[in-house]
């Protein structure tokens, strides 16, 4: 992709690389670290504010910005990671830092109904998914509130007797981050914190996958202020086949034969899942 790549092109490149280095698929040493770095590079590329900071100030500028936001530091290898998306060394910096935020929105599990033939041959499935994404200008709708200790968490001091106070924690969805609260009826986000977004996803159904196995799109679940988006999991559900049934990596077929064939032997032509035909000879 080019330096002026669209968000859709960046997402496509990210999906390709994340599938290549996903720890569940790639057991090579260092794959998990590479996967985490690719995810971070994608996060920066899709965050206009972070991307602009990195463009102007490089690694140190982004690192300082994230430290001010309470995200810590210690991530490295920007030049290598950005090259996965086709940017190479086009950015002025070369490194960065963050600490994984603890809270994420719930993961979403969706059944993916596929045929036995699709599992045998593999398939590419295009789907549309509607999720909730943050209002474009959501940060303008936050106000300072020291009682907010994190997303949905409010802590206040309550006097229970002269000279004695008690710290009380309560749920408050208006708290979006530590020290920050959502302003109700904010003009720049009239529909609230989030808005609906329709996205196109390409599901890569690999040959030989099993029922119950998830195909995961990291960070594609609903967004919420102060939280990482959870994962979207398409869980494979196999439809019943007319003739064959599967047990592990084996295919079985059950058929009735007349007694004379059982005694004298027979041969029968079958059609495989991929369409080719073969003959089975059975001795009596």
Image (spheres, grey):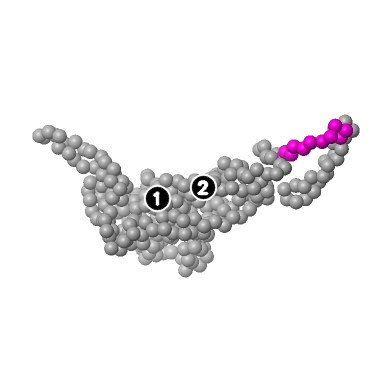
Q: Residue 157: within the magenta? A: no
Residue 149 in view here: no
Q: Which residue position holds label 2? A: 110
Q: Could you tell me which residue is drawn at 18 percent across and 40 percent down? A: 157
Q: Secondary structure at mark 2?
A: strand
Q: Which mark is residue 59?
A: none
Q: Is residue 197 visible?
A: yes
Q: Nearer the viewer, mark 2 or mark 1?
A: 2
Q: Assess disc 1: are there few (<14), some (14-19) or many (≥20) residues with their C-alpha within 10 Å of its C-alpha.
A: some
The magenta stretch is: 251-261
Q: Residue at left 31%, top 61%?
A: 190
In this image, 232 relative to 146: left or right?
right
Q: CA distance from mark 2 to mark 1?
A: 20 Å
Which residue is more in the foreground, 114 or 210?
114
Q: Give the structural element (helix, strand or loop) at label 1.
A: loop
Image coords of residue 57 (percent x, y): 36, 63
């Amino acid at each position: 992709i080019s330096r002026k790549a669209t968000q859709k092109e960046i997402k496509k490149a990210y999906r390709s690389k994340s599938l290549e280095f996903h720890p569940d698929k790639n057991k090579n040493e260092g794959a998990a670290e590479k996967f985490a770095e690719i995810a971070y590079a994608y996060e920066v590329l899709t965050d206009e504010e972070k991307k602009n900071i990195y463009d102007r100030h490089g690694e140190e500028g982004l690192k300082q910005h994230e430290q001010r936001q309470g995200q810590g530091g210690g991530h490295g290898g920007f030049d290598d990671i950005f090259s996965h998306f086709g940017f190479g060394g086009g950015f002025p910096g070369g490194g960065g830092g963050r600490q994984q935020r603890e809270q994420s929105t719930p993961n979403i599990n969706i059944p993916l109904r596929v045929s036995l033939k699709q599992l045998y041959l593999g398939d590419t499935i295009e789907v549309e998914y509607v999720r909730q994404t943050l209002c474009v200008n959501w940060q303008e709708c936050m106000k300072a509130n020291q009682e907010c200790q994190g997303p949905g968490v409010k802590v206040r001091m309550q006097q229970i007797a002269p000279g004695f106070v008690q710290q009380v924690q309560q749920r408050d969805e208006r708290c979006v981050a530590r020290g920050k609260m959502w302003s109700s009826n904010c003009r720049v986000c009239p529909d609230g914190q989030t808005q609906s977004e329709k996205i196109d996803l390409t599901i890569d159904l690999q040959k030989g996958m099993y029922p119950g196995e998830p195909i995961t799109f990291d960070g594609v679940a609903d967004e919420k202020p102060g939280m990482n988006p959870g994962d979207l999991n398409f869980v494979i559900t196999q439809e019943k086949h007319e003739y064959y049934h599967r047990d592990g990596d084996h295919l079985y077929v059950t058929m009735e034969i007349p007694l004379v064939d059982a005694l004298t032997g027979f041969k029968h032509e079958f059609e495989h899942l991929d369409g080719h035909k073969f003959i089975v000879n059975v001795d009596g």
